[in-house]
Image: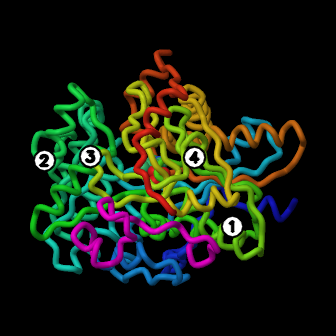
Amino acid sequence: MSEEKKIPYKIYLSEDEIPKQWYNVRSDMKNKPAPLLNPGTLKPMGFEDLRPVFCDELIKQELDDTTPYVDIPQEVQDFYKMYRPSPLVRAYCLEKALGTPAKIYYKFEGNNTSGSHKLNSAIVQAYYAKKQGLKGVTTETGAGQWGTALSMASAYLGIDCKVYMVKVSYEQKPFRREVMRTYGASVTPSPSMETEIGKKINAEHLGTTGSLGCAISEAVEVATKTEGYRYVLGSVLNQVLLHQTVIGLEAKAALDKYGVTPDIIIGCAGGGSNLGGLISPFMGEKLRGEKDYRIIAVEPASCPSFTRGKFAYDFCDTGMVCPLAKMYTLGSNFIPSANHAGGLRYHGMSPILSQLYHDGYLEAVTAEQTAVFEAAQRFARVEGILPAPESSHAIKVAIDEALKCKETGEEKTILFGLTGTGYFDMVAYQKFNDGDMTDYIPTDEELEKSFATLPKVEGI
Ligand SMILES: *Cc1c(COP(=O)(O)O)cnc(C)c1O
């Protein structure tokens, strides 16, 4: 007990304790994530095949299933020092409000202008683009956090940044858009009339408000057709999970200082990058048989890739120009209902996490958005931070688990990822506050329709 008292509200590491290497969880996986396939030939894609789309160094990281630790370039380490280490917070106030014997910790990644963990990978990708002598990068953004993060990183390094922003967000989140423009990025609503794929999607889906899968296709098209540009992606890919392990490594180092071992680790899952980054060092111990943890992915009931998706090769984008990835997917045509306000709208899931889930190393649950916003409000009122709707999926399940402990009297230690702040999500909060928020769960028929579009990949 006396040991317990010493744990501060916030455990900060010193600047010197920011990780100098990322941890590659694939090195400890017996079943490696399946390789990316060429959408035309269905052959695994190697370094040369990926070069027109991605930066060289990032392709090496993408394909590297064996190196356990990868050095973080000094320039990236220096950038990390502007906003890292991020605090690991003991949620004393939330514990008290819930009356739970559980001990709750969260790793808060919202302490930078982009408001989320995405900056951890944006700076790396922009860095390698610049190092390769490129002029700029293209990308998509949904809610806007990734686009903002990449704009910040590109501005810092002095390279150009073209963002294709899902149209509904472009219209609903004008302030996000202006943040990106302030950092010098060009922002185009997607589907646009500037690309072949954008024109096609606009013609086929009249009045569409866009989707991430569609914005990705546009960004890839522009990258491959414009000299000196490459495409970068803010989630899903192996390289992004690698960069995000800075979250888990810091969290583990902070907990280790106080001899704390979590029983349950919880993260929200869109494309899987924050969850993968948070759990990687813990998962490594689990894979090596050193320790065991309960690991829970939380996804929206309106976009349930893990819990209702298929583990199959699928396109990463609507335009079917990207490599095929083997992942839990709802089908690349799947577009979550327009009333879904809580982010995490991507149809697929990180191939690494998909393989781990398939092999039984992590659990997944869904949360409905009204319950997610209730959890967000509860959290904001006691812990002070206004959470992003995405992050609030993790809060919801952390609260559920803490309340279970209240019933059983168990003093479990819960760690969850608080990925960001929700200041740009006030339209969604307004809906919730006005009582206008609804929950939409796709029907089996809708999902079947979408599964029907999965590519037929035989023999794998
Ligand atoms: C993008 C984002 C997510 C979801 O993306 P993952 O790749 O699944 O981590 C979660 N929270 C916030 C705040 C985000 O911006």
Residue at disc 1, secondary structure: helix
Q: Is residue 390 above or below residue 255?
A: above
Mark 1 vs mark 4, foreground winner is 4
Point 33% across, 67% down: residue: 123
Label 4 belongs to which residue?
A: 306
Is there a contact, CB below 8 Å, between mark 3 and mark 2?
Answer: no
**Magenta residues, start to end:** 26-55
- Find out whether residue 337 is within the magenta segment: no
Name the mark on residue 289: none
Q: Is residue 77 above or below residue 316?
A: below
- Contact, CB < 8 Å: mark 4 with mark 3? no
Q: Is mark 2 on a helix, strand or loop?
A: loop
Identify which amino acid the numbered label 2 is placed on. Answer: Thr
Task: Kindly identify which residue carries mark 2.
Answer: 195
Q: Which of marks 2 and 1 is in front?
A: 2
Report if residue 224 is visible in the image: yes
